[in-house]
Amino acid sequence: MSIVHESPRSASFSVLTKRGDIAAPAQVPTCDTCGTDEHLIYEEYVPARMSSPGSDAVSANASYSCSECGRFSAHAVPASWCPPNWSFYG
């Protein structure tokens, strides 16, 4: 089982695994150049999930680009976050 730690001062999370490893902090998508999420185009989003029964959770990930400056980024995102107006298709 993984333990998620949230930092109240920033929107970043880190995951502590059963082995005690700390994964890279998950951050809410924001353009580092423009300093906002206002112009982001989300290209891919994969929600947090279990890779197999009894294993550690795989963190949620997003890739996106900024329509204002053209910067691209991809990284882990908090499990509680999802892109605006995003929903599962059934």
Image: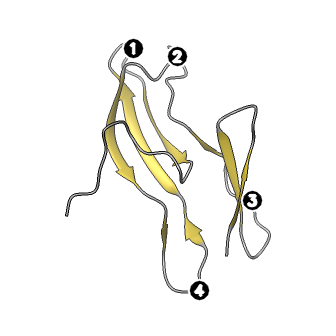
Discs 3, 1 touching: Cβ within 8 Å: no
Discs 2, 1 touching: Cβ within 8 Å: yes
User: 85 or 69, which lies in front?
Assistant: 85
Element under disc 1:
loop
For mark 2, does the 10 Å Cα neighbourhood hold few (<14), some (14 to 19), or many (20 or more) residues? few
Report the residue marked by disc 3: 22
User: Which callout, 2 or 4, points at the residue further toward the start of the chain?
Assistant: 2
Q: Residue at x 38, y 35 (%)?
A: 64
User: Which callout, 2 or 3, points at the residue further toward the start of the chain?
Assistant: 3
Q: Distance between the residues labelled 3 and 4?
A: 18 Å
Closer mark to the observer between disc 2 and disc 4: 4
Discs 2, 4 touching: Cβ within 8 Å: no
Q: Distance between the residues labelled 4 and 1?
A: 42 Å
User: 90 or 69, which lies in front?
Assistant: 90
Report the residue marked by disc 1: 69
x, y percentage for residue 79?
A: 54, 54
Q: Residue at x 67, y 76 (%)?
A: 1
Residue 33 shows which numbered tag? 2
Residue type indicated by callout 1: Cys
Report the residue marked by disc 4: 54
Q: Residue at x 77, y 75 (%)?
A: 19
Discs 2, 3 touching: Cβ within 8 Å: no
For mark 3, does the 10 Å Cα neighbourhood hold few (<14), some (14 to 19), or many (20 or more) residues? some
Q: How far apart are marks 3 and 1 (CA)?
A: 32 Å
Examine the rendered structure and indicate whether residue 26 appears above or below residue 4: above
Residue type indicated by callout 2: Thr
x, y percentage for residue 24?
A: 67, 51
User: Which callout, 3 or 1, points at the residue further toward the start of the chain?
Assistant: 3
Q: How far apart are marks 2 and 1 (CA)?
A: 7 Å
User: 73 or 77, which lies in front?
Assistant: 77
Q: Distance between the residues labelled 2 and 3?
A: 27 Å
